[in-house]
Image (cartoon, helix red, strand yellow):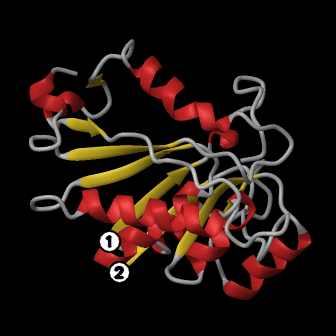
Amino acid sequence: MPPQQSSLDTAAAVLIPVPIDSTASFRTGARHGPAAIIAASAALEDYDIELGVDVADFGIYTAPPLEPHVGDPHQMMERVRAAVSHYASQGSGKLTGVIGGDHSATIGSALAHLERHPDLSVLYIDAHADLRDEYQGTAWGHGSGARRIAEHCPISLIGVRALALEEREFIEASGIPACYWPPANQTDIPDIIAGLGPLVYVSVDLDVLDPLRNARRGHT
């Protein structure tokens, strides 16, 4: 993207690389994701066929990668929250997102946006529910991302195909809209939409994609 469309001053959107995977389970390596995604994006067309727009016209600034806070997921969450708040408050407000890294990065990002928009709701797209109160010794890892967010704002889940009994019970007790895969006793998409407010933060974990086409991931 040319400089006039990718500088912080002129860009409408900011992407913050968050190269972390310290809370990942099964396989690490997600910390390399941000750099790989950014490198691959150079080979993509900017024009979106479905929307009929050239996203480069809006301008996207890629921020410097955040320094990982290895060994303290809560402090890393606060680091992400501070960075997102900083960029989102630039000028008249910039659309700000993060590129992981493991899915714990979404906690700080979502909470930062919630501070600016109290009526925010979250659409959480993931093969896992991420609703454990604590997982592998931390309440701030990838297995608890949706749980921490649900403590502060409405959240809806799409794509879940693996969850613990604790998570299923929390979904039922809290009334969280959830669309499972494969579809069985699922909440209809209209109900998912009805559970969201006018401002929606979208969080996507790549493990929601078909494993046959998206292999070699960890549980992140």
Residue 113 picture quarter? bottom left
Q: Residues within 10 Å of mark 1 (few under 14, many from 20)?
A: few
Q: Which residue is mark 2?
A: 119
Q: Which residue is mark 1?
A: 198
Is 173 situated left or right of 73 in this image?
Answer: right
Q: Image height check: is 152 above or below 144?
A: below
Q: Amino acid at mark 1?
A: Pro
SS assignment at label 2: loop
Q: In this view of the protein, can residue 53 be seen by the observer?
A: no
Residue 110 in picture, x, y percent from top left: 46, 66
Is 63 situated left or right of 171 in this image?
Answer: left
Residue 97 in picture, x, y percent from top left: 38, 51
Using the image as rendered, state which of residue 217 and residue 77 is in the foreground: 77
Q: Amino acid at mark 2?
A: Asp
Q: Report the residue at 76% width, 26% height from top.
A: 215
Q: Residue furthest right?
A: 165
- Tell me if label 2 and label 1 are in contact, CB under 8 Å: yes
Q: Residues within 10 Å of mark 2 (few under 14, many from 20)?
A: some
Question: Who comes first in sequence, dot 2 or dot 1?
Answer: 2
